[in-house]
Each structure stands twice: as C-alpha cells, then as structure tokens.
Image (spheres, helix red, strand yellow):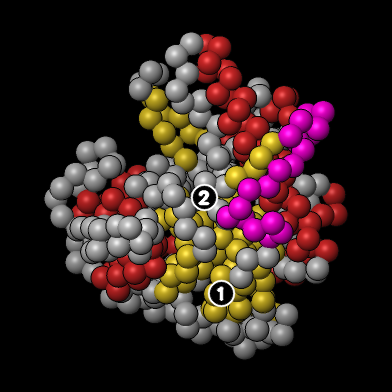
Amino acid sequence: MPPAPENERAAAPASSSALTIATYNIEWFTELFSRDNILLRDDHASRRYKISREEQADAIAAVLRAIDPDVLLILEAPNDSDEHRDDTVAALERFARYYRLRQRKALLGFPSPTHQEIALLYDPDRIEAVHEPMANPAFDTAYPLALHDEGLPEIAVFSKPPLEARITDRLSGAVFRLIGVHLKSKNPRGGNTLEETLQNAVSNRRKQAGQALWLRQTIDAHLAAGDDLLVLGDFNDGPGFDPLESILGRSALDEIAGQGASGLINPYLQREGSAATASTARFWRNDLRQYLEALLDFVLLSPELAARTDPEWRIWHPFNDPEIARDETLQQALLTASDHFPSAVRLTFSAGS
C-alpha cells in the first residue's frame, strides 16, 4: 500500500478548539525498525502472528489516519538505546514521514530497558509538547513506600518510567499536563507449580500496586497545584479484574483514578454498565483455543478539565464500535496492527481557557 496523501483538516473556529488525544499500545512496534531506525516495510514476518512487517506497518498507519489524533501516546514504541544506535524519536518521525502523517514530531521521556518505550507522536502545527518531569521522586528512580496491606513495604520501580509532558494547544492557548503510563503486568510468568504461580501473581500485584500508589501521589500533587491533567495508557488492570484485588484492598486502576472530588474521570471506570462489556485488548488463549478480551487502556481526566471541555470518548474496537464494524478495511487494520485497540477522547477548549 503506497503512502496516503497528507491529511487535510478544517480550521477550528476562533472561539473554540477541539483536540483529539489517544493512547495506543502497538504490539512489537520496535520490530518494524532496523538498528539504524530504518523502517522495515517488507514481506518478512513481523512478531504478529502470520502478519508481515509491511502489513503491520501499513495497518498502523491506516489506524492513525482514521483516529487522526492531535496527540498520540504510543506504548511499546520503538526501542531507544545508545548501545544499539536505536532512537525512538528518529524511528517514529521516520515512520510519520514515510506515511505522510501530520503527527510528525515525537517526544520521548525517560528511556526504558525493556525495548518498550513510552513516547508521544503529535502534530507540531497544532500543539507544543515538552518533556517536563514533575514527580517527586522522579519516575526513573526507586521509591520505598508502604502499601495498604498493613503497611508492608514495597520498593516501587518502573521498568517503563511514565512519560510526563506539558502540552500547549496553539489555537486556544490551553495548557495541560499529561502522564503516559504502562504499568507492570500481573501475568505470573515463571511458576512451575501452583504455589509458585500464586507467589509470582501476588508479587507482581504488589509491584503494580506500588507503581499505582506512586502515580496517585503525583496526581494529587498536580491537582493541589491546580493543573489540568490527563493520565492515559495501558494500566494492565481494572476494577474487578482478578481475585487478587482483595489482597491489597483495591485495583491499581482504582488507586490511580481515586474517588470523590479528586477522582479522575472516564466513563469506563464504572463497575457496571459500559465497563462490563467494554474492551481495549484482544489476546489469543492457546489453552482455551479462543480470544480473551480485556479493558486495560484508559484516558483519565482531572475533574475540572473534564467539566470544561465536553469530552467525547471512543474506544476504536473493530467489532464493538458500530461505525468501525461497517468499515471492513479499518476493521482489518485494527486487527492487523496490534493486540490492543486505541482509546481516545476529544476535548473542546474555549479560547483563553
């Protein structure tokens, strides 16, 4: 598939400005690039099952054109490493140039040792994005803290340090903070017995809980400072996600979202209704010979930001979204590109807000 022409967008009215912000976990994105950050668009197998690198790359670009975000948080972004000459920003910007995407500038925060970076891809004509760490301690360090289970200690560490950015909307002048996250997975890999598997699951749950508590403390600091804030990404968790929630009293997502006047806003946080059927990921379970769906990816808004911007939410699910279900080309692109589906919100800012 040849590159598509550059997107055209109608100018927003001077009195208001709408921004689309999305999060997208793109499985094995890094495997589409050489060590010199060259896009490998060929017929060799990607890390996606029975999908070539050309097919996956084209599908990713098709999905991004359909969403047309002003700001996109990419999880599992191309690797960044001085040792191997990998460069996340160079790879993403090269991808954007090849496919003539208007989201042609990339931003990386703290690099990760996991080959799964957290990065932004955005339209520089529309917004300004600056990496501006505010967490104390910084997310690329270790943080000893007490969890809620009788104060037992945990040394919280992020293998994928959250990306903190200050975003400025060039049309309205609105400024807000963005924290992009990819929490620790609870998958209990490595257990040879049921007891070992359970121990690994509890250990991973505690590590994830420590990350969540650290994030929530940072969120509270932003809210106390009066910042408008988005917290978005792959939380690898959700309310009612598994029985181990009872060990620590709440899910990682519950911890991060909070409650009451300081609770972050997202319609899929409800324990009933839409949250019961919503999904942002689709994984093949070989033992069951079927796909498992899960709600893992969220865009959370601070209360005042949500109240002022009339948010419109959308999960780009190939089957559950009726508009996408009628578009076979986009539906197939979503299934080809990744095992996660984008989650997005459209915010309308008044001039001077």
* Residue 92 seen anywhere in this rendered image of the structure: no
Q: Residue at x 47, y 80 (%)?
A: 124
Residue range corresponding to the magenta coloring? 135-153
Please name the predominant secondary structure of the magenta segment in the image: loop
Give the image location of residue 113, x and y in percent.
44, 49
Asked if 195 appears above or below 215 in the picture, the reply is above
Mark 1 Cα shell of 10 Å, populated few (<14), some (14-19), many (≥20): some
Give the image location of residue 130, x and y in percent.
56, 74
Please name whichever residue, 314 or 255, is drawn nearer the observer in this view of the structure: 255
Asked if 282 appears above or below 128 in the picture, the reply is above
Q: Identify residue for label 1.
A: 130
Residue 34 placement: quadrant: bottom left
Question: What quarter of the picture does the N terminus occupy?
Answer: bottom left
Question: What quarter of the picture does the C terminus occupy?
Answer: bottom right
Q: Identify residue for label 2.
A: 160
Q: Residue at x 76, y 30 (%)?
A: 152
Q: Is residue 293 left or right of residue 228?
A: left
Q: Tag 2, which secondary structure?
A: loop
Amino acid under label 1?
Val
Amino acid under label 2?
Lys
Mark 2 Cα shell of 10 Å, populated few (<14), some (14-19), many (≥20): many
Mark 2–mark 1 Cα distance, whole angstroms, equals 19 Å
Disc 2 vs disc 1: Cβ atoms closer than 8 Å?
A: no
* Residue 107 seen anywhere in this rendered image of the structure: yes
Q: Is residue 145 magenta?
A: yes
Which numbered disc flags the more N-terminal residue, 2 or 1? 1
Give the image location of residue 123, x and y in percent.
46, 76
Q: Residue at x 82, y 28 (%)?
A: 150
**Which residue is outermost to the bottom?**
14
